[in-house]
Image (cartoon, coloured by chain):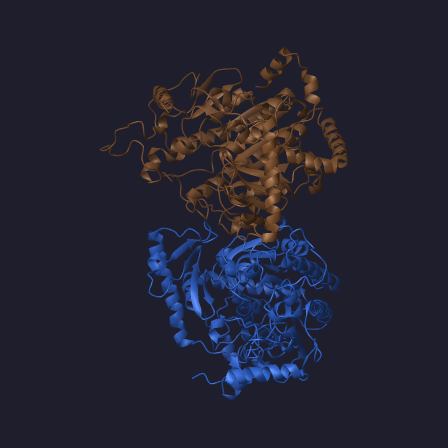
Chain colours: A blue, B brown
Amino acid sequence: MKRLLAFAGLLAGSTAAVAQDAPINHDAEYYILQAQRSAQWVEDDAAVDAALAEFRDSNGGRSPNIISVLIDDIGFGDLGIPELNAIRGYETPSINAFSDEAMRMVRMYTEPSCTPTRVAQMTGRLPVRMGMGDTTVDIAGFGLPDEEVTLAEVLKEAGYATSHVGKWHMGDIPESWAMNQGFDYAQHAIHQQGQLTIFNEDAIKEQVSVGIGDYLDTYTVDNWFRPDASAMMTVIEGEAGGPIREIRMEPGETWGASKYDEMNQAFQDKTLEELERLAGGEEPFFLQYWPMIPLDNTRAGRDGPQSPNGGLYVDKMQQLDSWLGDIFARMEALGVAENTIVVVMGDNGHFDKYSPQSGFTPMIYKGGKASTHEGGVRVDAFIRWPGMIEEDALLNSIIHVSDLYTTLARLGGAESFIPRDRLVDGVDQSAALLFADEQKARRDHVIIYSINSAKAVIKDQFRLNLPAPGESPIIAKFHDLYRDTREEFSVSTEVGAWGGQEFVRILGRHMARKEKFPDTPPAFGVPYEGIENIRPETQAAVETFLIRRNAPQK
Amino acid sequence: MKRLLAFAGLLAGSTAAVAQDAPINHDAEYYILQAQRSAQWVEDDAAVDAALAEFRDSNGGRSPNIISVLIDDIGFGDLGIPELNAIRGYETPSINAFSDEAMRMVRMYTEPSCTPTRVAQMTGRLPVRMGMGDTTVDIAGFGLPDEEVTLAEVLKEAGYATSHVGKWHMGDIPESWAMNQGFDYAQHAIHQQGQLTIFNEDAIKEQVSVGIGDYLDTYTVDNWFRPDASAMMTVIEGEAGGPIREIRMEPGETWGASKYDEMNQAFQDKTLEELERLAGGEEPFFLQYWPMIPLDNTRAGRDGPQSPNGGLYVDKMQQLDSWLGDIFARMEALGVAENTIVVVMGDNGHFDKYSPQSGFTPMIYKGGKASTHEGGVRVDAFIRWPGMIEEDALLNSIIHVSDLYTTLARLGGAESFIPRDRLVDGVDQSAALLFADEQKARRDHVIIYSINSAKAVIKDQFRLNLPAPGESPIIAKFHDLYRDTREEFSVSTEVGAWGGQEFVRILGRHMARKEKFPDTPPAFGVPYEGIENIRPETQAAVETFLIRRNAPQK
């Protein structure tokens, strides 16, 4: 809700325009690099400005369109490398072709699960800063606070038309939703794929889930214990400032595989529709398509294997690849392939709880989704901008997903709308991307959190898996990631001693900086509040939730 | 020594020409595929013959030249995939460019270590069949028997000029050496890189080895116990039928890092020299360049890191890449790029005993060199034949290194010289390669041995790690390799039960076939016999070896 904040600023007598020129507040490590590279950065900034001005001149004075495709639970190497497709018996030809036209951000680090990664991309901040490090699966009554200034809000201020379709997963309270966080239009699921692929009747039949209603309640006293997943809100749709409605379910209806298919197809169709609408508009556009597939957990009578691999996620990944191919083709047809930045990436590592049936298992790095090892946070990530970003290129700089916030704002001419009253973790990687030069990167480290706890510090090619409380950093595990992708061989004591101490100091500076910019809690509220057509069973589930939340806890 | 055998055949009254037309004797599984695909195979064979005839017509009636580059201890994905270079901080641009012009044999299976892989490529047979499954590191007095008919002997019969440079490692007795196994000229090390990179003075100084002469012998009684590695024969050179000389050491000289560098440079130089000589000849040529690097184990005062990774093997791999680039360029300059088949591949997985210092650790698959898991036997493998084999292509068929024997013989018009009096494991994969079609593969399985013991059976996408003696195959580990590259998730009991039984039957047929074609021992003899200029210390080491070998053992 950038506008409200700006308005509040005016009321308080501050001058928004002046404030916007101040430097962005970054985390401590940024200033160490800046001190070493300041002259180069000034030069690079001028070169970036010149390149962007030239682009706008060639684009009728408009900034580039921006499309973000964020794919669930994709490990490093799943997409864009035909050899690694081959050894796992599937194909992603559309994304592979796209990757040939794009730059691979080789060291893109996400957060370890869906919600925090999406929060980081949307806010430019580590999710721990506003208590959004956890991924909720059910009715939870909290979410992304109104006070956060999302990338959509930043771009909107700079004149972008904004639209979001697909997954969202940043809370079940109204202020968290996309149409209330800067998107002119949004159609998105409220929760993630748990209820939609696991807690439903098809999943019970296939013994994927423990059963929801389909069990003998002989010994059960608490009838609210097991979820009635069909009662949870599914997909909502609305425009900024307008009414919000659930669009996928009628009262009494139950969810299952066919509904999931219908929803996913509708997201794809709506994305194409939005693409067409936005491409025909006067403003540059920012369109997010965050698909729910490849996640799926039941065959449920649908077609058999689509790949020699045959894993459920892999088959769905092939479907998604084909859908993305349709989107890339439509971009061509609409004449927006050339003037649009497209980012395609995963949101975290493999959901290895469903390995090997899913078809995906952690391949190159250790760990999957929810792990803070490399396998949890290293993903395939591509950025395409014809003529502006080198095609079929590799950029081997560390990039954190929050950097997309600052960088895309810069590329969209919206940097001045990034808030200056808070710490922004995302750094501007424009120069590294536009000039394909790792020496122009403005980050060489990342701190990996699990929910509220820092678990690893990575700088350059080294990774310290942080010592447990009371454990000396000297014997903590310290890895050279170039030589040891799986974190199996902790390097020697000597390097460990240096690394342990130095890396704990990096963490110390990060923590000290929180004294000036303290972490705050997420927003709490009443789930689904204000949905016009809330179903009676959904209303009952909310009331159940509120009774449970209000049960005495002290 | 093909000619002697053929001569013996004539003496016995058999008709060599008739015998040569008989079908090759293959292992049992081959006939199961043949029974299913016989009509297709007849058709494919005709198409292969037509394609080869057309090639020869366009090549002045000559068969293609063949170059084999076999690289030590390279895991899957080390070469040819820039993304996987990047994440490990090094570059192999020459091989990557080569791979863009070549077909990657995605499922090339080798044996788990140097000697058996080289034996399989040279003989077309599993090394267990002639007792060559083990890798020796010191003076051993045995090697590849004269009775084996090598690929060089087969091609020579068909008119090829043959040459071998670099590693050989198939025995320290004369009948085993390249110039006595079908190569017109050979310059090769006798042993592997143990004495040359580990058991030398530089390695003692860097604490890589336990010490050879440089230790306090206060408690030592057996002075022959520790090796005098400098006494072992190093590099020999000679022509078929001519004298063989050691070329790298003078009496009293000790080996070290600088000698290793000199030797490797000489192999590279000699390869270029041989390439030039052979390219100027009238016959098609078969040239093997089997480098000793990337293996190396000491910095030894040489230049510092050549890559951000900085591991010793990785740095040397970059050097080898550059050398191979020189060879590819020389091929262009000599006009033999177009009419030469080039195979570049690894001989087995990473030498993970030296991880992570080497810079290489098992990345995608489980296990390294000497392991019978995928990581021990899956390697990068490329075949380039401009205009004949699809460029920048992937062939996802199982190919065993022994298949190169049969296939290259076929492509070189020498198939009739493959012996018919023994079992040949290598199958003819010409049709799959020439038509880039997995459905034309003549193998869908491989049996993985460690020395003399079968350890795993792989068919299609499934792998059974064979049960230990007395263990039921039902609970043995059974993996879907598409879904589980690291062999971490054994698949369900139901599949396990089928797979276990079915795969043990495959092994049973393989073992039953040995009743007709029994395994035989390797050749035994006196090490280095007949070397003209054997050094006195080498002669003493041989005598010591013989005393030890002759010590009563029963």
**In what quadrant of the picture does the C terminus of chain A appear?**
bottom left
> Can you name the residue that lies furthest to the left here?
B218
Quadrant, the N terminus of chain A:
bottom right
Q: Position of residue B486 (x, y in %)?
A: 53, 50
- Residue found at the very far bottom of the displayed protein: A11
* Front residue of this view, candidates B3 and A459: B3
Count of marks, rendered view: 0
- Give above or below for A105 relative to B164: below
Q: Could you say where residue A386 lies in the image, as x and y percent from the top left?
A: 65, 58
Q: Is residue A242 visible?
A: no
Q: Is residue B40 left or right of residue B204?
A: right
Could you say which quadrant of the image residue A433 lies in?
bottom right
Q: Is residue B484 above or below residue B350?
A: below
Asked whether the viewer can see residue A520, the reply is yes
**From what the image shows, is residue B95 above or below residue A58?**
above
**Frontmost residue, A332 versus B501:** B501
Q: Position of residue A143 (x, y in %)?
A: 54, 77
Specify the quadrant of the image occupied by residue A202. bottom right
Q: Is residue A191 above or below residue A437?
A: below
- Residue A372 in the image, given as x and y percentages of width and height: 47, 62
Residue drawn at (63%, 55%), measured in percent from left and top? A99
Residue nearer the viewer, A368 or A436: A368
Residue drawn at 42 percent across, 51 percent down: A489
Q: Residue at x 74, y 64 (%)?
A: A334
Q: Report whether A197 appears left or right of A46.
A: right
